[in-house]
Amino acid sequence: MPRKRYSDDVRHQVMMEVEHGAKVEDVLKRHGIAEATFYRWRARYKQVGDEADPARRLLEEENRQLRDICAEAALEIRGLKQELARLQRTKTSP
């Protein structure tokens, strides 16, 4: 009997369904996956950790970029406030 090949998307979907509380037996039956295959995937998934999830990596990268943008904006705002305060002091000084 030839081995079935499952895409990364199917593997990820199965893992997420089980992680979110679905019964393993139900998920495996719905996708036509052997129990041994699932537990092999789960062992590999735990070894690699969250780095195996491309969506998570993408979100982490976007979050990093947003934090950088916010930090730059905060610095710019601080500089503008300081400049405004300096201008107001020089305007009121005779």
Image: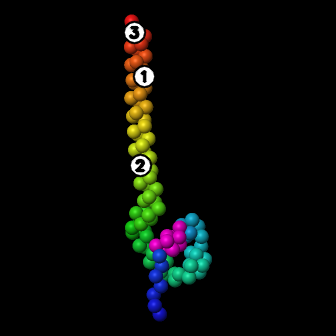
Q: Residues within 10 Å of mark 3 (few under 14, many from 20)?
A: few
The residue shown at (56%, 79%) is 31
Q: Amino acid at mark 2?
A: Gln
The residue shown at (47%, 93%) is 1
> Reading the chain from its start, which is encountered first: label 1 or label 2?
2
- Magenta stretch: includes residue 29: no
Magenta region, residue range: 8-16
The residue shown at (41%, 50%) is 64
- Magenta stretch: includes residue 15: yes
Residue farthest along the top direction in this orientation = 94
Vertical position of residue 92 compared to residue 23: above or below: above
- CB atoms at circles 3 and 2 under 8 Å apart? no
Question: Mark 1 = which residue?
Answer: 84
> Quarter of the image holding residue 40?
bottom left
Q: Could you tell me residue 12's position as x and y percent?
A: 49, 70
Question: Mark 3 = which residue?
Answer: 93
- CB atoms at circles 1 and 2 under 8 Å apart? no
